[in-house]
Image (tube, rainbow, N blue to C red):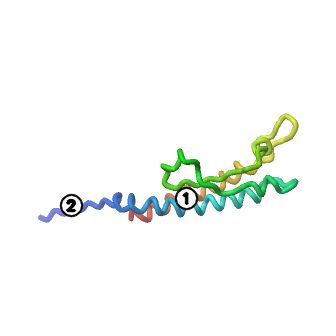
Amino acid sequence: MITLNWKLNRFPELRRKLPHIAVQIVEKHTDAGVSLMKQLAPVRTGFLRDSIHKAVLPAEMQGLVASRGIEIDAPYWVYVEYGTVHMSAQPFVTPAMESVRSGFVAECSRIINRELR
């Protein structure tokens, strides 16, 4: 009788590849988030829409694998997003992020599954 034990551990390989893969995924979905936010932002003067941009996260967050984020320079964006007692909400950040998040999670899952095969 022959006994065959086969152990496949691809986690070290995945660990080496993951930072590079993560940067690509984060860049792609950050760009998509900026684009979608700009499309959904209500426009009166265009300042709010034009103030949305991709940014490098602050130094205290640099320990992350991919340190990208989205900034909105218009200080009143939160009032537009959530509304006030004088005006109703016109959400543009939350819908954009929810839309991008689902694609981000799906792509991460797909790539990790592919790399572990």
Q: Is residue 79 above or below residue 117?
A: above
Q: Amino acid at mark 2?
A: Asn
Q: Which mark is residue 106?
A: 1
In the rendered structure, the answer to whether residue 17 lies left or right of residue 88 reads: left
In the rendered structure, the answer to whether residue 8 lies left or right of residue 58 reads: left
Task: Classify mark 2: residues with Cα within 10 Å, few (<14), some (14-19) or many (20+).
Answer: few
Tell me the residue at 69%/58% (across/down).
Answer: 34
Tell me the residue at 51%/50% (across/down).
Answer: 62
Residue position marked by numbered label 2 in the rendering? 5
Count the marks: how many? 2
Determine the secondary structure under disc 2.
loop
Q: Residue furthest left?
A: 1
From the image, which quarter does the C terminus lie in? bottom left
| Residue 45 x %, y % | 87, 55
Determine the secondary structure under disc 1.
helix
In the rendered structure, the answer to whether residue 18 lies left or right of residue 42 reads: left
| Residue 105 x %, y % | 55, 55
Distance, label 1 to label 2, CA atoms, is 33 Å
Task: Classify mark 1: residues with Cα within 10 Å, few (<14), some (14-19) or many (20+).
Answer: few
Q: Quadrant of residue 14?
A: bottom left
| Residue 109 x %, y % | 49, 58
Q: Is residue 27 above or below residue 79?
A: below
In the rendered structure, the answer to whether residue 27 lies left or right of residue 6 reads: right
Along the line of sight, the residue nearer the viewer: 114 or 46: 46
